[in-house]
Structures are given as structure tokens and as C-alpha cells.
Image: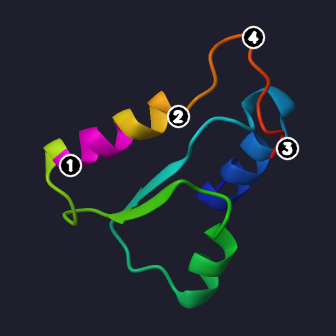
């Protein structure tokens, strides 16, 4: 299973749809790969692009955007 298949599996599982996905990659993504990820992930970050603190801040913001347990998700 590659990353694209993993994202598809997460998004096809109702209870997991609200989980934010942050792609952290060492490679330069092609325009086609970026297009495939568009709208499916919270962020795409190339390794070394952000400091550790910036990365933690981004992850914290993504987690804080999750609905509280029992709240309805937007059904993406």
C-alpha cells in the first residue's frame, strides 16, 4: 500500500474522514501527484521545509480542528 492508497482508505472509512492528513515527504511531488492530493490532505510539506516547532504548530492546529467526540463531522 502506498501513501495514495492509504489516504483513499482513510477517506473511504466514515469514522476516519475527519482525521486531518499531513503529508511529509522527502521527494519533490509531480504536478500529477499534487493534483491527486489536492482537497484530500490538510497540508503537503517537504522535509526540511519547516522547523520542528513550525511542524508541531501545524500538527497542533490540524488536531485542534477535529470535532469533539460525539459532534457531527462535515461528512467529507
Q: Is residue 56 magenta?
A: yes
Question: What residue is disc 1 on?
Answer: 54
Question: What residue is disc 3 on?
Answer: 12
Q: CA distance from mark 4 to mark 1?
A: 30 Å
Q: Main secondary structure of the magenta part?
A: helix
Residue at 34% in and 45% down: 58
Tell me the element at label 1.
helix
Residue 8 vertical position relative to residue 67 in the rendered view, above or below: below
Residue at 46% in and 29% down: 64
**Which of 31 and 61 lies nearest the eye of the viewer?**
61
What is the quadrant of residue 27 in the picture? bottom left
Residue at 14% in and 53% down: 51
Q: Which mark is residue 63?
A: none
Name the residue at the bottom extreme. 31
| Labels 4 and 1 touching (C-beta < 8 A) | no
Name the residue at the top extreme. 70
Q: CA distance from mark 1 to mark 3?
A: 30 Å
4 vs 3, front mark:
4
Q: For label 1, count other residues whose C-alpha is less than 10 Å away and answer few (under 14), some (14-19) or many (20+).
A: few
| Labels 2 and 3 touching (C-beta < 8 A) | no
Q: Which residues are magenta?
A: 54-59
Q: Which mark is residue 70?
A: 4
Q: For label 3, count other residues whose C-alpha is less than 10 Å away and answer few (under 14), some (14-19) or many (20+).
A: few
What is the quadrant of residue 9 in the picture? top right
4 vs 1, front mark:
4
Q: Position of residue 39 (x, y in %)?
A: 67, 64
**Which of 68 and 34 lies nearest the eye of the viewer?**
68
Q: Is residue 59 left or right of residue 70?
A: left
Amino acid at each position: 500500500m502506498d501513501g495514495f492508497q492509504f489516504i483513499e482508505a482513510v477517506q473511504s472509512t466514515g469514522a476516519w474522514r475527519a482525521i486531518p492528513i499531513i503529508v511529509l515527504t522527502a521527494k519533490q511531488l509531480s504536478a500529477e501527484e499534487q493534483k491527486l492530493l489536492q482537497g484530500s490532505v490538510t497540508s503537503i510539506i517537504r522535509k526540511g521545509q519547516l522547523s520542528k516547532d513550525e511542524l508541531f504548530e501545524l500538527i497542533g492546529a490540524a488536531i485542534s480542528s477535529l470535532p469533539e467526540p460525539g459532534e457531527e463531522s462535515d461528512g467529507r
